[in-house]
């Protein structure tokens, strides 16, 4: 497989939900797409098959973003297969069972922060090492998938998750400034309540229906509506945007 002159994107957690919608849209926009996933190989392969069936180019790579060795393997696989990396979408993220802070054990907290924070840092680090003009790279763009929970706090649901996304907001601002003169833009999207399977993993599959009444637009968002914002931030159309936190929330 050869990327030729096509831009190459890594999307963590790209097999389902917002990541899968982003992968499909990126392929339509001409990107070669590397879809990272954790457990659900069937879902990731289905996205790859769909993209390849429509004439695009995609691969799926298993890996836990919280593990440095898996992140290194992910990026080395892309080095080997495509020889370049132009865009990173730090999308992999988890919630856990809805809970008050007083009931959160240390295993839960460590897993939350390792996946949502350390995972995003490790992937950003590997991307910057390759993209930075300081290191001989050609520049690139990173989009972090944060959450509006960083502003709302998610009380009695998952304050740990909200705090992890607060860290992502700060990382976006700091890293953007750090690499702005090295050809790399770093931005974040902050989705509101979006209709994906993440709510079931928090123990409430019907959460979108319950929460939508608190959304000014009175509905949950669709993954594709977040994907469009991500693709815009990665594109040259957003050439002067860096360190931005773009809320995609239906007005919340
Ligand atoms: P989702 O449907 O639950 O999908 C999550 C994806 O992340 C899956 O592909 C999963 O892989 C992958 N993943 C989980 N842990 C991973 C790990 N340690 N390493 C690598 N991949 C991992 O979630 P989503 O709703 O699309 O959420 C995507 C991002 O949007 C997350 O960062 C989330 O916090 C953020 N977000 C979502 C909402 C919302 O309402 N949906 C709102 C705000 C922000 P497998 O398929 O292999 O399990």
Image (cartoon, rainbow, N blue to C red):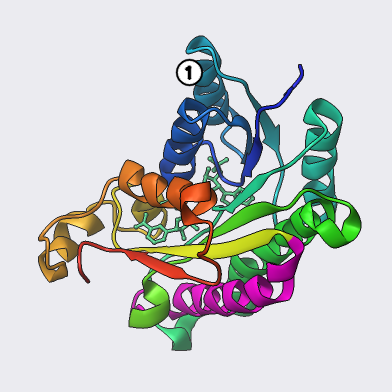
- Considering depth in this image, is 78 or 16 the residue closer to the camera? 78
Where residue 224 appears, as percent x and y from the top left, is 34, 41
Q: On the rendered structure, is 32 left or right of 181?
A: left
Q: On the rendered structure, is 59 left or right of 68?
A: left
Residue 150 seen by the camera:
yes
Where residue 58 appears, as percent x and y from the top left, is 62, 24
Please, what is the dominant secondary structure of the magenta stretch?
helix
On whether residue 168 falls in the magenta region, the answer is: yes
Residue 153 seen by the camera:
no
Name of the residue lying farthest toward the bottom: 102
The quarter of the displayed image where residue 117 is located? bottom right
Crowding around mark 1 (Cα neighbors within 10 Å: few <14, some 14 to 19, many 20+) is: some
Q: Which residues are magenta?
A: 153-182
Q: Return the residue at label 1.
A: 50
On whether residue 7 falls in the magenta region, the answer is: no
Where residue 249 appears, as percent x and y from the top left, is 27, 63
Give the residue drawn at x 61%, y 39%.
Answer: 39
Where residue 7 appears, as percent x and y from the top left, is 65, 34
């Amino acid at each position: 497989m050869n990327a030729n002159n096509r831009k190459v994107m890594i999307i963590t957690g790209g097999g389902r939900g917002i990541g899968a919608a982003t992968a499909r849209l990126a392929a339509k926009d001409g990107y070669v797409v590397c879809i990272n996933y954790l457990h659900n190989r069937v879902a990731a392969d289905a996205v790859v098959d769909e993209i390849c069936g429509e004439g695009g180019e995609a691969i799926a790579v298993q890996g836990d973003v919280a593990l440095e060795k898996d992140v290194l393997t992910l990026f080395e696989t892309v080095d080997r297969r495509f020889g370049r990396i132009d865009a990173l979408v730090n999308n992999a993220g988890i919630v856990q069972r809805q809970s008050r802070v007083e009931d959160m054990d240390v295993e839960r907290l460590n897993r939350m922060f390792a996946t949502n924070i350390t995972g995003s840092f490790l992937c950003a680090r590997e991307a910057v090492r390759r993209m930075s003009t300081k290191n001989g790279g050609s520049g690139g763009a990173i989009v972090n998938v944060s959450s509006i929970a960083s502003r709302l706090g998610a009380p009695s649901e998952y304050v740990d998750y909200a705090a992890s996304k607060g860290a992502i907001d700060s990382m976006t601002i700091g890293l953007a400034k750090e690499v702005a003169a090295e050809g790399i833009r770093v931005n974040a999207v902050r989705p509101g309540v979006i209709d994906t399977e993440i709510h079931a993993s928090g123990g409430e599959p019907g959460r979108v229906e319950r929460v939508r009444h608190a959304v000014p637009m009175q509905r949950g968002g669709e993954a594709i509506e977040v994907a469009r914002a991500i693709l815009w931030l990665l594109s040259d159309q957003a050439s002067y945007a860096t360190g931005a936190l773009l809320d995609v929330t239906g007005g919340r």
